[in-house]
Amino acid sequence: MSEDQPTKKKRFSILVCIDGSEESYQGLKEAALFGRGIDADIILMYARLIDQGLHTGGLQMNVIRGNILEWDMDIPGIRYLKKGRQLLLELGNMSVDWEETVTHQNVAGDPLGDHFIQHTNRQGKRIGLKLRTTTDIAQGIIDQQMEYRYDLVVLGGYGRRSLSERLLGLSPMASKVVREAGCSVAVMRPGPEDKQGYLIVVDGSDRGMATVDQTAIFIHRSGRPITLVTIAQDETEISRAQEQLDKVRERLSLLGVQVKETMFRVGDPEQEVLEAGRSFSATVLAAPAPKGQIARLFQEDVVYRILEKSDRSVFLVRSIWDI
């Protein structure tokens, strides 16, 4: 997605937040699947704090405004973006002969500022690398999304935290982005990149149905198998659960998306989703309803507890109702 001009035709756009962690690169691999095709753009971004221990010494301003990937400087953000770009080259999402443009923006109080490198092929597909300077990492990601209206934000759930810190759940940064980003968010966790594909949780609400289209767009692009699940809180709700599954499966079929299988479970929604999700590479949930709206099965606290406790990647899908 070009940062200097709004695109005339709506494209599927993905913002991948790179922080050097294992799960951020796992997220990039997933985004590479979603971002296949000439109608999809991928932006890799490293958000860094203003003047974060940066000493440019005698580095000339015309060098600073050049291509940051050509610098022989051990700045973390540049190192991580280089690795991400190389990964996309290896995965076949881009090649070295793409046209390249470089832009720079000064940031008060920081000697480096913002940098954006865009690679474009002859069909118009774009891969961007962004070094963004901010006073708060989470807010920098949220601001980037709000400004350029991405369809999906992908980020690591733990960041560069120690193993003991990971036991505390999501990093504060990831938690803030998940709650405040104006689009769907994929929270990646380290682990097997593919077990049985994606588990889509059907919650039975109108909002849940409204997320089906959004879910179908990015998951279908990946080519991964899809399983649907809904939860009956007791035996009396089993027929309702089956009706919900049939309805969603039919809707996905109309959209050209094939479902591998459907399943329903009886019990506490939170525990049942966590248990079922262990057999899949990622669990997909409708994001909590905005204030003033009522969700039928998965209330806000349940959704966020699943996100916190899951040991697999979790996708929170926002429909146009939420954006």
Image: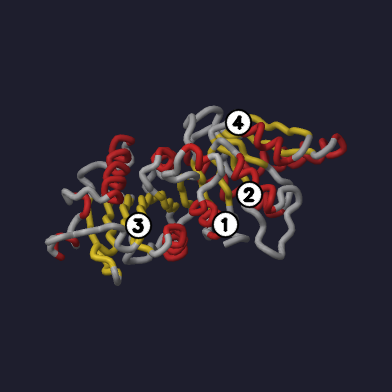
User: Residue 168: x and y, percent?
Assistant: 56, 43
Label 1, label 3: how far apart the Cα atoms are: 21 Å
Label 3 neighbour load within 10 Å: few <14, some 14-19, many 20+:
many
Task: Say what secondary structure mark 2 lies in.
Answer: helix
Tell me which label, 3 or 2, sits earlier in the chain: 3
Task: Say what secondary structure mark 4 lies in.
Answer: loop
Label 4, label 1: how far apart the Cα atoms are: 23 Å
Question: Which residue is nearer to you in this view: 169 or 282?
Answer: 169
Name the residue tied to disc 3.
Answer: 48
Tell me which label, 1 or 3, sits earlier in the chain: 3
Q: Identify the residue at horizontal 64%, vertical 43% (top origin).
A: 306
Tell me which label, 4 or 2, sits earlier in the chain: 4
Task: Say what secondary structure mark 1 lies in.
Answer: helix
Q: Identify the residue at horizontal 73%, vertical 33% (top origin).
A: 264
Residue 261 seen anywhere in this rendered image of the structure: yes
Label 3, label 2: how far apart the Cα atoms are: 27 Å
The single residue placed furthest to the right in the displayed view is 236
> Mark 1–mark 2 contact, CB under 8 Å?
yes
Tell me which label, 4 or 1, sits earlier in the chain: 1
Label 3, label 4: how far apart the Cα atoms are: 33 Å
Tag shown at residue 179: 1
Q: Quadrant of the C terminus?
A: bottom right
Question: Which residue is nearer to you in this view: 128 or 84?
Answer: 84
Name the residue tied to disc 2.
Answer: 304
Name the residue tied to disc 4.
Answer: 278
